[in-house]
Amino acid sequence: MGTSPVGVAIIGGGASGALVAAHLLRGASSPSRIALIERDGRKGEGIAYSTGSECHLLNVPARSMSAFEDDPEHFVRWLATQGLPAAAGTLALQVRLPVRARPYAWNTGWLVNCTGTDPNLVRRGEPLLEALVARGLARPGPLGTGLATDHRGRARDLHGRPSDWLWAIGPLRQGDLLESTAIPEIRVQARHLAIDIERSLAARGTNPSGAPTETSPGPKNRPPSAQLLAS
């Protein structure tokens, strides 16, 4: 990694992190330097969209998958450039499950997932989250789900105080918002969060490039001015 200053560090390069980066770049008034950090190197997919199985279908209509609220056809147009069709109606699902060691399949229009994935992100053994909680810089959300945040997505520390440099988005806010895992919710969070980060950096005399403004010289080798956790 180079030594050039970074204005915003986004930890987690899945859908949540990629959407925030896109909104920051879309609304930037000057050249921006944003670090999108993903441990497996793949950007924009995350757990939800990295599956290679054709049986895994989106449970959201294609027109609700746009990265931008004001451009609802964005995702549909992208599909067209890839030579992929977009289903306009209700999806038909086929569920395959082993029952008494024999495979069974059902055709259905609705699927309710009640298998109960572990929502406790700290308990999953994520080193970064464990370190933030251990140092009192963050705390688990209600019922141990995700991280505790304020209405702007700022992480709350051990004493409940919102951070001025650490934000969370998407599944990491599930404890506070409950519905925080699908693109329609995440893209709204991403847009608001990008605006909030821009304002916060401006108030502190920096911009998304990581460079100081004319009124705030600051040190040359400063750490990122804002950090975002995107599960």
Image (tube, grey):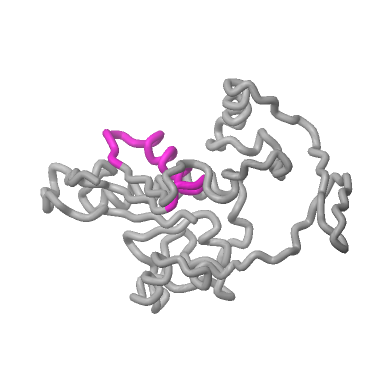
**Residue 155 x/y as whole percent:** 42, 65
- For the residue pair 129 and 168, the one nearer the viewer reads as 129
Q: Which residues are magenta?
A: 12-33
Quadrant in the picture for residue 179: bottom right
Residue at the spot 52% in from the left edge and 48% down from the top edge: 46
In magenta segment, residue 223 = no
Q: Residue at x 50, y 48 (%)?
A: 16
Examine the rendering and report whether any part of residue 188 can be seen: no
- Residue 23 belongs to the span the image colors magenta: yes
Looking at the image, how many numbered discs can be counted on the residues?
0
**Does 113 appear above or below 48?**
below
Residue in the picture at 67% in, 42% down? 53
Q: Is residue 214 above or below residue 229?
A: above
Compared across the picture, whether 139 is left or right of 83 comes to left
Residue 113 location in percent, x, y?
75, 58
Q: For the point 88% across and 52% down, which residue is it?
A: 104
Above or below for 126 versus 92: below
Q: Position of residue 225 (x, y in %)?
A: 26, 53
Left or right: 79 as drawn, with respect to 54: left
Quadrant assignment, res 175: bottom right
Quarter holding residue 114 = bottom right
Residue 9 x %, y % = 33, 50
Of residues 171 and 125, which is closer to you in this image? 125
Is 176 positioned to the left or the right of 198 in the image? Answer: right
The answer, for residue 199, to whether it is visible in the render is: yes
Q: Is residue 173 above or below residue 159?
A: above
